[in-house]
Image (cartoon, grey):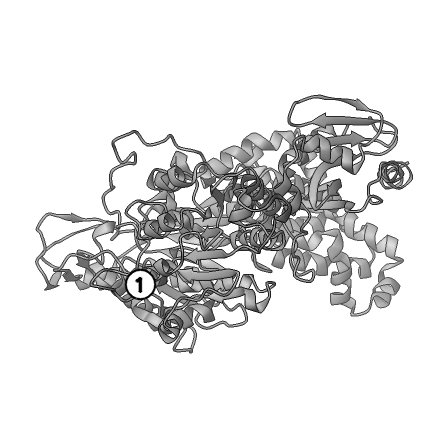
Amino acid sequence: MNEAETRAEHIDPALKAAGWGVVDGSRIRREVIAPGRLQGKGQRAKAEIADYVLIYRNTKLAVIEAKAWDKPYTEGLAQAKQYAKKLAVRFTYATNGQAIYGVDMATGQEGDVVAYPSPDELWAKTFAEANFWRDRFAAVPYEDKGGAWESRYYQEIAIRRVLEAIADGRERILLTLATGTGKTAIAFQIAWKLFQSRWNLTDWKGQGEPDGLGTRRPRILFLADRNILADQAYNAFSAFPDDALVRIAPDEIKKKGRVPKNGSVFFTIFQTFMSGPPKDGQPSPYFGEYPPDFFDFIVIDECHRGGANDEGQWHAILDYFAPAVQLGLTATPKRRGNTDTYAYFGEPVYTYSLKEGINDGYLTPFKVKQIATTIDDYTYTPDDAIVEGEVVPGKRYVEGDFNRLIIIPEREEYRVKLFMGMIDQSEKTIVFCATQPHALMVRDLVNQVKASKDPDYCVRVTAEDGARGEQALRDFQDNEKTIPTILTTSQKLSTGVDARNVRNIVLMRPVGSMIEFKQIVGRGTRLYDGKDHFTIYDFVKAHHHFSDPEWDGEPQDPEAGGSGGRGPREGDPEPPGPGPEGDPPPPQAKIKIKLADGKARTLQSMTATTFWSADGRPMSAAQFLESLFGTLPEFFKDEDELRRIWSAPETRKKLLADLADRGFGKEPLAEMQKIIEAENSDLFDVLAYVAYARDPLTREARAEAARVAAAGEFTDKQQAFIDFVLAQYVKLGVDELDAEKLSPLLRLRYKALNDAFSELGVPEQVRKLFVGFQRHLYTSPHEKHH
């Protein structure tokens, strides 16, 4: 009896007998927990799928991992524990339909159980103590927007943890989730459950009548620091009734002479709340027109950007509305630069990291192209012309000085031409520049060398560009529009802007902090159809941040009395503040240099690529090779076995899938082909080179050797088809030999499948022919050891 039959005939009836799917509010679902890391060419690593998830009162309570009747009943136990940990449920079970093994993940108790607990029994075991608000929140289902929204496992955990914290009486709450993981959707679902359960401060603090809990709906404030973020949130909350949503805007306040108070969910930016006409010669910000206890719940988006900082302008707002429960949302794990955020809100109730997002397949992995040029730094020599300013003889100008202290137009032009030659010019790209004038210069240089005929191909979006820049940004975010294709910016786009189809990020200014580096990386991580990865073009050695232990680990808390962080490194820019999105003030007098003609013509560059490893840390090509070398013996014991595996489409496919699961997908292997100068070779050659130091053979040489080896083995018509397949292989690579390519190849060659079968034999014969000849490709006698 296979697993499907075991489930249908034994496990499903046992669950039904326990009341699952029968008791009102209980249900069972098979759940794709994570779709699997993107590996290139539309492929993903193996998905994590739970056989059964038991849900009661809109809350996941347990996982069951099923195996076939004749397998040991605890065979799926390791998986069951892994999935329970991932879904943050307390109970998990393994079964083969004959016996059940249960685990309490909280106490560590495990052992045989006679039957599955009923929904009420499992609820009581999970939540030993009664809690009025927890039960009330649980009674409200997620709002799926007519089936358009499907929650991800980590989003549900984040929502649950916040609501549990509120139910437990906590007033300051923090969520840390990587950029692109849906923080706004999480905030919406939390607000929805609070709204529908009629939670409010008065009842929550026990000041209402016991029988009258839920006397009114809450008033909720969503506070952002940019209009585009407040607008994105306002649109994401569209399931609320129209009269419940209020966008607080300064022009509306001026027109009506008062702040809006009718509504349930209010959206604004802190700059609006901080503004307002002075009264009696004293500042009179608009937020003061609301009573301090007006809002029951406040969501502070991107709260690391100054919200909890004593010097931050938000602090006055947060202090004023102190009675409200305040939820901070951040993409930034605890770092030396933002410990004040954590001091204010406390430790996060849930964290979901960039590494987890990429490895789960909910975020896009990335490659880094590190680019070094012969003018990364500069020392003046008399053959260069000083166009303006005063140069300091003998001073070495480094990355952080360029476009702030010193401008060399030929240097910027060279860099622009370099990256424009490396990217696909039709792909959406963001270029980070040192200052707003630098962003202007880069915009013009890009438009001068672009292949596109559209004058708006590249535009600048900075604080100085105002409404025109905001419109350009909206057009860039619109996936239906292709213009503008490239945006240049300085600080503005390093955070919070949702542009899913960004394929390239170009760094032409230093990135001073890990916080900002993660935010910039987050511009490219959002998923989009057909997007397997994005690329960072790094002119400024920002890739050093990957070597920092802070990249995906928790650093120690800063020491008392000091900043706790490293001192500024040479060339660091000022960090972006939470206020207006301008640049830090540049020095007054800038130096402008024109390079001597011979110098400008001999600028050179080098590029190196880094790979995303399976443990979530980018690594160099040398590290990748070393890691691959250490891993390959697990998959084949010698060269003959590698040849055997690679000669058959099915075993080759499995090997590639297994390697991809270990972080060695087709994409990085293809990059490795370039590094060992084997682009015209087979992926087999990469593996044979790494494992056995075999010289790569070109696909053309392999195809020729296969023709010779197979001479006389096939009919003329069969040989003609094989020659056609070999030509496709030489042209396009080993993917053309996959089993699923047989039908497309036959159609390409013969137009109709029936014509192919009349020439080559019945379908089974044709399949054997296609699979069988491939062994000749990988038994060439001409390969020599180094």
The N terminus: image quadrant: top right
500 w.r.t. 681: above or below: below
Q: Position of residue 395 (x, y in %)?
A: 12, 48
Q: Using the image as rendered, state which of residue 608 and residue 462 is in the foreground.
A: 462
Count of picture labels: 1
Q: Residues within 10 Å of mark 1 (few under 14, many from 20)?
A: some
Q: Residue at x 32, y 32 (%)?
A: 558
**Label 1 sits on residue:** 275
161 w.r.t. 366: above or below: above
Q: Position of residue 452 (x, y in %)?
A: 43, 74
**What is the secondary structure assignment of the residue under circle 1?**
loop
The answer to which quarter of the image holds residue 720 is: bottom right
- Is residue 474 visible in the rendered image? The answer is yes
Q: Using the image as rendered, state which of residue 780 and residue 738 is in the foreground.
A: 738
The answer to which quarter of the image holds residue 143 is: bottom right
Q: Position of residue 776 (x, y in %)?
A: 72, 45
User: For this view, does 24 lie left or right of residue 249?
Assistant: right
The answer to which quarter of the image holds residue 537 is: bottom left
Q: Residue at x 91, y 39 (%)?
A: 9
User: For this view, does 460 lie left or right of residue 38?
Assistant: left
- Is residue 327 visible in the rendered image? The answer is no
Q: Position of residue 276 (x, y in %)?
A: 30, 65
Q: Residue at x 35, y 46 (%)?
A: 542
> Identity of the amino acid at label 1?
Ser
User: For this view, does 391 lie left or right of residue 397?
Assistant: left
452 w.r.t. 244: above or below: below
Q: Residue at x 67, y 40 (%)?
A: 655
Q: Using the image as rendered, state which of residue 3 and residue 132 is in the foreground.
A: 132
User: For this view, does 430 lie left or right of residue 205?
Assistant: left
